[in-house]
Structures are given as structure tokens and as C-alpha cells.
Amino acid sequence: MSRILLLGGSGILGSEALNQLQVRNIDYVSPRSSDLDIRDKGSLTTFIADFKPNWIINCAAWTNVDGAEDSFDSALELNSVAVKNIAEVAKKFECPVIHISTDYVFDGDSSNPYSEAAPVNPVNRYGQSKVQGEIALLDAFAEGAYIIRTSWLYGATGKNFVKTMAKKALNTENARVVDDQKGSPTSARDLATGITQLIETQPKPGIYHYSNAGSCSWFELAQAIYKNAGADSNLVEPISSASLDLKAKRPRYSLLSKEKWNSAGISEIPDWESSLEILLPEILAEIRESEKL
Ligand SMILES: NC(=O)c1ccc[n+]([C@@H]2O[C@H](COP(=O)([O-])OP(=O)(O)OC[C@H]3O[C@@H](n4cnc5c(N)ncnc54)[C@H](OP(=O)(O)O)[C@@H]3O)[C@@H](O)[C@H]2O)c1
């Protein structure tokens, strides 16, 4: 019987993971950061000693990619120091950890999907902080560590690209979207389902890649959102990354190979277009409700 400590249960991925645990009647607890700050190792130790989970799912992170350029220490504290805390306490209590990482550990110079064994080389500080987190977890507790690297996450909760574009589509607004970065969108619900199935199947610990199947540019994703929302996709204009002048550089190509996940038989990975069709109506309904549209 699983007993799960879910960290970051209020975020884009965490909220879907929380739903999955509820739907499957799994015993869990998911404290907010105000109740358990994972940067505080003492509190983490007390919490885990009391609750005695037999799995930890860590969806908590610093996720502000541009903000990490100026606040690297804060990003490192959450994405690396706190992960080291989790790893050390989990090892003490012999509790396996599922930790979420990112496609931004790669530089984007490849033209083939990145395997789990491909060398990391982040092009921004967020990516650096996530690499440090992976190293911290594997150094402290490799035998109990599952690192799932994902990309372009979206869901009904929190700030994300799909929600932003869906809002623009509903308001028949123009959108200027980069067409020179290629990756795979990931439905937070699909990944959350995959996480619960990983707990059921218990494959070998290590790094796994998970994103929806297929690939697109942000521009193509935005067009698909407009189309599915019943808006004119010609309202979306392709632009170059350089014209946005963002603080953090992004990898040009961040496709992840899912061969390892698939051959471990963990879960089926749906393609990004069908998953978008499933989740977008809920996202649109949520926007209509909150914006009284
Ligand atoms: N978003 C993406 O496109 C994307 C892409 C690739 C990988 N990832 C990775 O996927 C994972 C989930 O990302 P997400 O976008 O779902 O995250 P998110 O929506 O930004 O949520 C972050 C979560 O971290 C928690 N948190 C923040 N500070 C904390 C602290 N000091 N102690 C405990 N919890 C704290 C927050 O909890 P409170 O609300 O309670 O403060 C929140 O639940 C992360 O590891 C991220 O790096 C994300």
C-alpha cells in the first residue's frame, strides 16, 4: 500500500499528481510551502519521520526561467540544496524519490532526440540549477532516485504557455510566438498518470524522459490552441527568439527520447495533439469561469 509525500502539490504538475492520487484512493499528504519549506532540512526530517511515506514525489521547484538569471542563489536553494535535503532524508528513511527535472539541462544543439545518457550542458541558469539538483539527488541516494525529465508542461493550474494562448484565443487577440524553438508539449495530466504508474511498475531507479509524443514549435503549438479554441489561427504570428530579447537563453531543440520509458513498460505516452484536445476544453472552461467570459 503506497503512502505518498507529494511536494509542490499546488503547481501545474503537482495539482494533477494530487488529483491522480485522490482518484486512485492512494494515501498521501501534500503540504504547502508555508507548512513545509523543503529548504529547511530539520522540518523535512521531522515531517518525514512523522508521516513515514514510502514514496516522495517532488514537483516543487523554482520554475521562473528568466528570474533565475538574476536570482541564481534562490533558484539553486530550491532546485539543488532542497533536493539534496530531500535525498539525504529519504535515504535515511529508505524512501524512494521521484524528482522532476527538465529538457533545459540540454543545450539544444542536437538534431536528434536526447537520450537519458546524453551529456548535459544547460544554456541558462535555471537549467544549471536543475542539473545541480539531479547531481545532488544521484550523489546522495542513487539507489532510490527516479529523475523524470519533462518539457513544455501545461495544465489548468498555474501560469503556462497553453493557458496564456488560450486566453488570447478566447479574446480574439493577436499573438507573436517564436518559431525557432522545437520541443514536445507535455500534458501535466499525462505525466501525473505516468508518475503513478511508475510507482506501480517500479522500474530500475535512474533518469527517465517523459514528454508527449511528437514535436512542434511554440508557434505551431499556439496555432493548434487557437484552432482548438475555435479562433482564427492566422491571429498567431511567427517571430524569432532573438526578437523577444528574454533574459535567459532557451535551447533551440529540446526533444527527449522516450525509448527508456517505453521499453520499461511504465505507461503509454499519448501524442501532444490528442492530449491538447483532451485538456484544452477544461483550460478554456477555467478561463471563462475566472474571467467571466
Ligand atoms: N513548467 C514547465 O514548463 C516545466 C518544464 C520542464 C520541467 N519542469 C519541472 O517540472 C516540475 C514541476 O513544475 P511546475 O511548473 O508544475 O511548478 P510550479 O507550477 O511552478 O509549482 C512550483 C511548486 O513548488 C512549490 N514550492 C515553491 N517553493 C517551495 C518551498 N520552499 N518549499 C516547498 N515547496 C515549494 C510551490 O508550492 P506553494 O504554492 O505551496 O508555494 C508549487 O507547488 C519542476 O521540477 C520543474 O522544474 C517544468
Image (cartoon, rainbow, N blue to C red):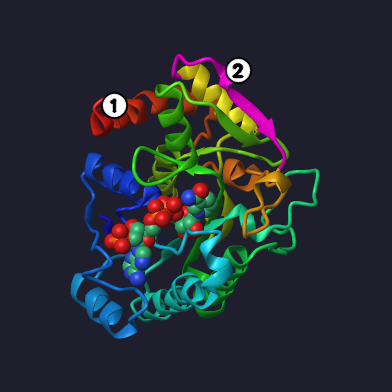
Q: Position of residue 29 (x, y in %)?
A: 22, 60
| Residue 136 visible here | yes
Task: Name the residue that disc number 1 marks.
Answer: 288
> Taking 142 as reference, is 16 above or below it?
above
Which residue sits at x=72%, y=64%?
Answer: 121
Q: CA distance from mark 2 to mark 1?
A: 22 Å
Front residue of 293 and 98:
293
Q: Position of residue 82 (x, y in %)?
A: 42, 75
Q: In the image, is residue 224 part of the stretch drawn in magenta? A: no
Residue at left offset 63%, top offset 48% = 260
Q: Which mark is residue 215?
A: none
Residue range (magenta) = 229-240
Judge by depth and name the residue closer to the eye, 212 or 61: 61
Q: Quadrant of the C terminus?
A: top left
Dot 2, crowdedness within 10 Å: few (<14), some or many (≥20)?
Answer: few
Query: For numbered disc 1, what is the local secondary structure?
Result: helix
Relative placement, left or right, of 186 versus 18 is right
Name the image quarter holding the N terminus.
Answer: bottom left
Earlier along the polypeptide chain: callout 2 or callout 1? 2
Q: Residue at x 42, y 48 (%)?
A: 195
On the image, numbered disc 2 is attached to which residue?
234
Residue type (three-letter) at the residue carrying disc 1: Arg
Q: Quadrant of residue 277?
A: top left
- Can you say whether 160 is above or below 271 in the image? below
Q: Position of residue 17 (x, y in %)?
A: 34, 47
Looking at the rendered structure, the secondary structure element under dot 2 is helix
Who's the residue at 63% across and 31% down the image? 219
